[in-house]
Image (cartoon, rainbow, N blue to C red):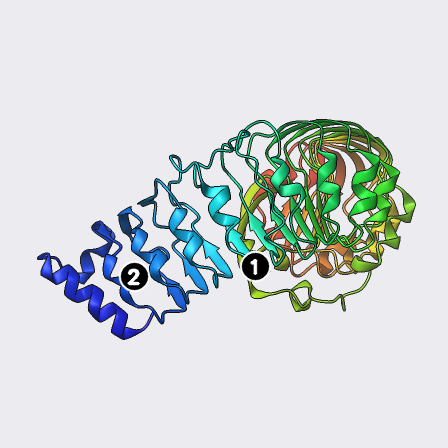
Amino acid sequence: MSKHIWSQIEAEIKGKGKQVSSLDKGIEIPKFLGSMGKLRYLNLSTAGFVGMIPHQIGNLSNLQYLDLHGNFGNYAETLSWLSSLSSLNHIDLSCVNLDKVSDWLLAINSLPSLKVLKLAICQLHYFPSLSVSSDNLSSLTTVDLSDNPLGTSVMPWVFGLSDHLVFLDLSLNNFHGPIPRGLGNLTSLRYLDLSANNFSSTIPEWFFSRFGGLEFLSLWSNLLQGPFSSSVGNLTSIQTLDLSFNNLEGKIPTSFGRLYLASNNLSEGIPRCISDLSAMATTNYPVYNNIAYSTNFRISIEKTSLVMKGRNVEYSSILNLVRTIDLSQNNFSGRIPTEVTKLLALQSLNWSHNHFTGRFPENIGAMRSLESIDFSYNKLYGEIPQSTSSLTFLNHLNLSYNNLSGKIPLSTQLQSFDASCFLGNDNLCGSPLSKN
């Protein structure tokens, strides 16, 4: 925001006997902002404002960008003033309390130029009696309605959204029942997050065939069950797939860039063709962030948190996440295929809490990009191969509760880990264990 506007805000605040520095203690958004008729960009995000959003903002007929997100003390009882902002192409009211707003869909539908809509954590409710078409929103590319009490089923309004829609986040909305077929209308999606709902039944066959352009898909923490559909191979552009914390079962397919399948009921062995994951088989893989998305796409997924290798890890952007295979807490058995060591760009490998047997992959030292290995709670036996001393980037290791034996190889990395990383291997010795 320009210094001119802030000077006027300061004047109004001082007129009330307050200092600008007290913004974080609760100041209402000044009504005089509505008199700045030429204003096109207004960003008051995380500024500590409280109170009702002034309807005078609706006087800003030239406004194209409105961001009030992160002002947890702000609220509105109506959004009817939005209908006057026909030039608006970006609106972010995330964390603003809209619990009493019953006309939000009507208001949003009156914005024909809208491209980015972010209403996460707004206490939004959906009113089925309010039948609203989304035909007027032909420019929308990004919709984030995550973490709202929107009812038990996805509202039909979503199914008619723009063919240009590439980003849709409906996570944490308490949706129930099967994944609705209407989502299949959104064939241009590249990012789809349906995580932390209560979707049940199987993942329908049409689901994977309709979203050939998807690059990010999360169905994490639902109630999905049944076999792992082979039609998932239709996701030819997928780079991040998270199906963890469901009740899926059976064999897994092979062509993914990142696998998050933890805490399911998957069984049998790991396919030897795992080395065909070409996105991970080279250290010269393309950087996901270089894909020509709008800035809005990247901002929408900043500060994503996920549980990996028993720790909470926060990344500045999920687009820069390490290349990971997480198959933990399933029922996999058999030997770890040696082909996995051909995935030279892999940085995190978590196969803990399964029933893997056999020896530690002999050539694991070739995976020089590895930063994390968790093979704990399996039935691996034999010695830890000498090649592990080549893993100079390794910062997390857990080999506990297997049947490993012999002396831990000497390296600058392995001896730096706590002895607990090797517990439960009675025949293992050497530093950092006390048994030599």
- Assign the N terminus to one quadrant of the image: bottom left
Label 2 sits on residue: 34
Q: Which mark is residue 87?
A: none
Toward the viewer: 318 or 366?
318
Pick whichever, 415 or 121, lies toward us. 121
Residue type pointed to by label 2: Gly
Circle 2 SS class: helix
Indicate the amino acid at tag 1.
Lys
Can you give x and y, in whole percent of width and height, for residue 354 in the image?
A: 75, 31
Q: On the image, numbered disc 1 is attached to which residue?
A: 115
User: Which residue occupies 59% across, 53% down?
Assistant: 137
Residue 309 in sight here:
no
Q: Is residue 303 left or right of residue 26?
A: right
Instruction: From the viewer's perspective, tell me whether residue 295 is left or right of residue 74.
Output: right
User: Whole-percent x and y of residue 290?
Assistant: 67, 69
Q: Is residue 16 visible?
A: yes
Residue 296, above or below 1: above
Q: Which tag, 2 or 1, sits closer to the chain's start?
A: 2
Q: Which callout, 2 or 1, points to the residue nearer the camera?
A: 2
Give the Cα distance between marks 2 and 1: 23 Å
